[in-house]
Image (cartoon, rainbow, N blue to C red):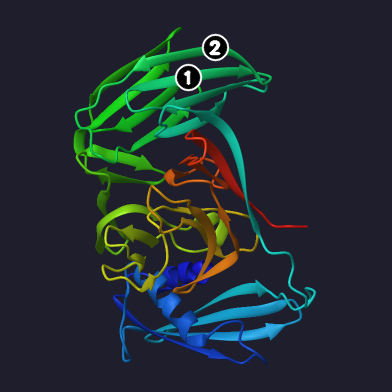
């Protein structure tokens, strides 16, 4: 529907308002018609037009029909005497076996353990043989180099910070194997090799933490973020303070990245869809969420932590987001202790997890991914 919304927006041009209706002429609609209409309205509105009841500047009629290859979405856009048509085919799943396939499973690979707390970590391949690992601790940035699995170099440089909140959070961003930036305690520390490893720290102006395509303002004396997103129609959504947020990848889901899930300070997890008010609330989610492109279907999927505190074992659950609802997929994966950091990996297919094993007392750095089963 993301593709159809793009085509409708192009056809509307500078039109200020539109009305939209959806009808189904196939034997069975592939989804709820009202949800399809609402999703299309939201996506088109994000591109500058405003949806109102008829009469409007333009009328959009979307028809769902079926052919041998699957479903076809046809949008007729009328502006005065002018009319345009946009067509988007949707592959059918009728030929798939009627039995459900194996449930996706969450996999965890522990890559490092140590007694000193870890705030974040990053893996950066240098070439086909060498890999650099960076580990952010509360007062230093540690670098390891592995050549075909063998440790050949270790260096650690102290870092400074202006604030030390009770729940200290940190974040690593690696631009390339030789350059990494750490954000922690109101400071930004940039590490580089030239030829030895050195780190320079300074106050983080604006307290911005880059996270994928967006940057959020971190509260340097606490452990949460704030921020807003401006959409293509100049509408700005200002989110309440939050611990983490996640949005879909348009490339893998076909959805607009204007959708965003926010884990608030009050324990409420809310879905925003191009508006300042939440479209849905999700219950039973923890404070850390990450979008993941698992490859198990085309829907938007996220990983979310459990609701326990630092004295309890934690879990990670996979959810699928369709329209404005979230459904748990498969069984949750339990960890032997609380999750302390949860960040999306650079590949979009996995997540970085820092947890503490309550039995051993060790801090564990792990890579979490989703397996689609056999």
Visible residue check, residue 178: no
Distance Cα–Cα, label 2 vs label 1: 8 Å
User: Residue 116, percent across and down?
Assistant: 42, 27
When the figure is inspected, residue 283 is found, relative to residue 228, above or below; the finding is below
Q: Earlier in the sequence, mark 2 or mark 1?
A: 1
Q: Residue at x 54, y 12 (%)?
A: 153
Along the viewing direction, whichever of 85 and 25 lies nearer the viewer: 25
Left or right of 170? Residue 83 is: right
Residue 217 has which mark?
none
Q: Which residue is mark 2?
A: 153
Do the CB atoms of the residues marked 2 and 1 lie less than 8 Å apart?
Answer: yes
Is the C terminus in the top left, top right, bottom left or bottom right quadrant?
bottom right
Place residue 21 in its image quadrant. Answer: bottom left
Along the viewing direction, whichever of 201 and 284 lies nearer the viewer: 284
Visible residue check, residue 10: yes
Q: Secondary structure at mark 2?
A: strand
Place residue 73 in its image quadrant. Answer: bottom right
Left or right of 288? Residue 231 is: left
Left or right of 148? Residue 344 is: left
- Of all residues shown, which one is farthest toward the front? 359
When the figure is inspected, residue 220 is found, relative to residue 45, above or below; the finding is above
User: Residue 128, percent across and down?
Assistant: 67, 23
User: Residue 162, percent across and down?
Assistant: 19, 28
- Of all residues shown, which one is farthest toward the top? 195
Q: Residue at x 78, y 78 (%)?
A: 98
Q: Which residue is mark 1?
A: 143
């Amino acid at each position: 529907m993301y593709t159809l919304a793009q085509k409708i927006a192009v056809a509307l041009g500078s039109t200020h308002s539109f009305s939209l209706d959806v009808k189904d002429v196939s034997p069975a609609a592939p989804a709820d018609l009202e949800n399809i209409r609402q999703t299309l309205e939201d996506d088109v509105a994000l591109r500058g037009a405003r949806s109102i009841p008829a009469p409007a500047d333009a009328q959009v009629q979307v028809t769902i029909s079926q052919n041998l290859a699957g479903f076809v979405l046809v949008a007729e856009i009328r502006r005065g005497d002018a009319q345009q048509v946009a067509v988007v085919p949707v592959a059918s799943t009728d030929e798939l076996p009627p039995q459900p396939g194996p449930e996706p499973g969450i996999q965890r690979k522990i890559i490092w353990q140590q007694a000193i707390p870890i705030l974040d970590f990053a893996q950066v391949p240098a070439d086909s043989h060498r890999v650099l690992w960076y580990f952010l601790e509360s007062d230093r940035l540690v670098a390891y180099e592995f050549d075909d699995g063998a440790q050949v170099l270790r260096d650690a440089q102290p870092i400074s910070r202006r604030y030390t909140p009770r729940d200290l959070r940190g974040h690593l961003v690696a631009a390339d194997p030789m350059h990494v930036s750490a954000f922690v305690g109101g400071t930004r520390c940039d590490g580089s090799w030239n030829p030895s490893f050195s780190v320079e720290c300074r106050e983080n102006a604006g307290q911005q933490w880059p996270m994928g395509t967006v940057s959020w303002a971190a509260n340097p004396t606490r452990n949460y973020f704030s921020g807003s997103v401006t959409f293509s129609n100049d509408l700005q959504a200002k989110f309440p303070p939050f611990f983490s947020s996640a949005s879909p990848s348009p490339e893998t889901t076909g959805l607009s990245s204007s959708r965003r899930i926010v884990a608030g300070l009050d324990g409420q997890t809310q879905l925003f869809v191009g508006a300042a008010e939440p479209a849905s609330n999700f219950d039973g989610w923890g404070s850390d969420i990450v979008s993941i492109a698992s490859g198990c279907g085309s829907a938007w999927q996220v990983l979310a932590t459990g609701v326990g505190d630092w004295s309890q074992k934690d879990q990670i659950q996979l959810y699928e987001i369709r329209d404005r609802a979230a459904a748990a997929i498969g069984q949750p994966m339990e960890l032997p202790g609380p999750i302390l950091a949860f960040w999306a990996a650079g590949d979009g297919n996995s997540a970085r997890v820092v947890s503490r094993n309550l039995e051993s007392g060790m801090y564990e750095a792990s890579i979490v991914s989703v397996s689609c089963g056999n």
